[in-house]
Image (cartoon, coloured by chain):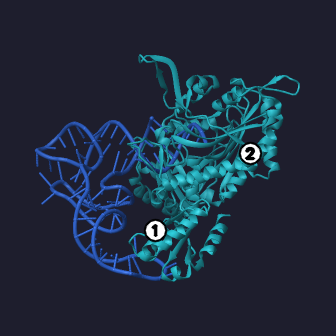
Chain colours: A cyan, B blue
Amino acid sequence: MNNAPPPDELYRLRHSTAHLLAEAVGELFPGVKYAIGPPIEDGFYYDFDLATPLKEEDFERIEAKMKEITKKNALFERVEMDRAEARAICDAEGQPYKVQLIDDLPEDEQITFYKQGEWTDLCRGPHVPRTGNLKHFKLLSTAGAYWRGSEKNKMLTRVYGTAWKTREDLDAYLNRLEEARARDHRKLGRELGLFLFAPEQIGSGIPLFLPKGEMLRHTMESYVREVQTRYGYSHVWTGHLVREDLYKLSGHYDNYKDAMFPPMQDTNDKGELTGINYRLKPMNCPSHMTLYNLSGLKSYRDLPLRYAEFATLYRYEKTGELSGLTRVRALTQDDCHIFCTEDQIESEFSLALKLIREVLERYGFSDYRVRLSLRDDNPESKFVQDDEKWTKAESALRSSLIANNVEYFEAEGEAAFYGPKADFIARDALGRDWQISTIQVDFIQPSRLGCTYIDEEGKERTPVVLHRAVTGTTERFLGVLIEQYAGAFPFWLAPVQIVLVPIADRHAEYANEICERLKAAGFRAEVDARNEKMNKRIRENELQKIPVILVMGDRDVEAGTASVRRRSEGDLGAKTIEEVLDYCRELMK
RNA sequence: GCCCCUGUAGCUCAGUGGCAGAGCACUUCUUUGGUAAAGAAGAGGUCAUGGGUCCGAUUCCCAUCAGGGGCUCCA
């Protein structure tokens, strides 16, 4: 736990508020056992082990108690103590989690406590001077959290809260939370008619896409396919079902079985089991490696070989993990497996990096971080032992990132078991991180599945495989995009780009003619000739975030024009149809 | 999977131990309107599902299913 952020003012404020919360909970819930209570981005939390559940309806009285404590304006006092004494005190007070924390502190570390009035907590500090400095805080939510983040441990009650220097900062933060909820992709997906879920009829975690949502998927996938083709990737198709034996061979059966849907058992014509089981495909790698193996003996001249696929995969995610489009059970990965030599890792990684950045830029996507995920030196960890290959791959990845001017951070222990990787991590409206793009080096599966090529000297060798996804999955990326754009897609991506509004019935025929010309020019256009006032139709199409609305009445029919209304800019005045086409072509860029 | 919260009309939500409510959407009629909501009428609910308590349950209790916030896991 030595990765604490720098103790700036807000850090101290939030950390101290966590202590304040703990004291208040201690008074209201006697016998509570304290776990940990760190500051986090925008706030803090504290984990408690309580005999009776703490609920959000308790927040009011907890906050009142916190305010009451701050009125005493006690000093935060640092108290040093030797290890045995500290341990004895925590033990005597019935605080087993604190005892564990003390036991796990490094030998040479000074044990310190912080005391605020009558209440004391094991803590490294630092804190604000007095409890009276804590004024602008609010409790936000409760959650279950495993002690030390392990499923095997007891689940504790976590209380999340936020704290700021001023009332204005606090209000601004609460407003931001409110606005974030308005751009939640689940809400916008319903309002804009993009997708829905039918958990009772179809199943949890299986999104159903309406015409507009499917148009988005189609546009997104066509775009990535075009870029991939331009970068020298070829596309393959490997279906939805795979014999289970392949996953036993690849190692997924042992490591990944829990995330696969149960097997389909084949039977003969007497209804007896044949012993052949099929699985819905949870990933493509074994399929692509099989394709590599069975499509002829490979020479070093064939490498690098890049098999890309837009594949719908099925993963049996635990029910509590499902979340809108960002965590689903049916997902479409823009996957690719690059078979190459060890010497080609760096250039292939670079190429993939370039491709990913071009795509993200096209989406105007800048709110992401790049994580270089490395192994750790823990001898018990999952990582495949091959020091030479790891070192080589890690330095190849690092130098490619630097050569391509990518800002990144390194994370030990985050690598895949089969090799290091670079992950692109985006954040959704509610502040949750989601992995989207990824490039992974794999030393292990190619040899397990018997992939080979013949090198310059006629010797058989095993290729390295890079696993790579550009947008990750169409579903998750779309979910994150919806929130980024707040549903207002750029013109090239918008499922309906242009809506034509004829003012009265007599203008409908004219509108239809123009609509046909727009469609012939490749635009996605619709006529809204409903029997509603023009103003209402404009309002509703504006709320649907339609990029361009064309309004036409008597004057336009006579002059051969339409008046152009651009989303969030308003009326741009009348243009001839040729001018409208040019205007739209300009918007496509 | 685990902890907590929630489940009432297509959507957003009121409400009650004793006849089920609003706005929007939907249907019909009137209205043909130049840049963000025309008017009227009508239709629509086994109050998630299954048990229990009660004279009586949409309301209280239990279970199941589903959704949400987290944890773990992950694209």
A448 on left or right of A554: right
User: Up-down: is A19 above or below A440?
Assistant: below
Closest to the camera, between mark 1 and mark 2, is 1
Query: Dot 1: what SS?
Result: loop
Would you say residue A231 is visible in this rendering?
yes
Query: Dot 2: what SS?
Result: helix
Pick the front one: B28 or B4:
B28
User: Whole-Å distance between the Cαs marked 1 and 2?
Assistant: 43 Å
* Residue A258 in the image, given as x and y percentages of width and height: 53, 30
* Residue A291 in the image, given as x and y percentages of width and height: 67, 30
* Chain under callout 2: A
Residue of label 1: A528
User: Up-down: is A97 above or below A132?
Assistant: above
A436 on left or right of A55: right
- Give the residue displayed 40% in from the left and 49% down from the top: A55
Locate the N terminus of chain A and report the quarter of the image it occupies.
top right
User: Up-down: is A287 above or below A438?
Assistant: above
Q: Are marks 1 and 2 on the same chain?
A: yes
Residue neighbourhood size for the residue with mark 1, other residues' Cα within 10 Å, grouped as few (<14), some (14–19), many (≥20): many
Q: Please name the amino acid that badge 2 sits on.
A: Ala
Q: Which quarter of the figure has residue A419?
A: top right
User: Up-down: is A354 above or below A450?
Assistant: below
* Residue A58 in the image, given as x and y percentages of width and height: 40, 53
Residue of label 2: A352
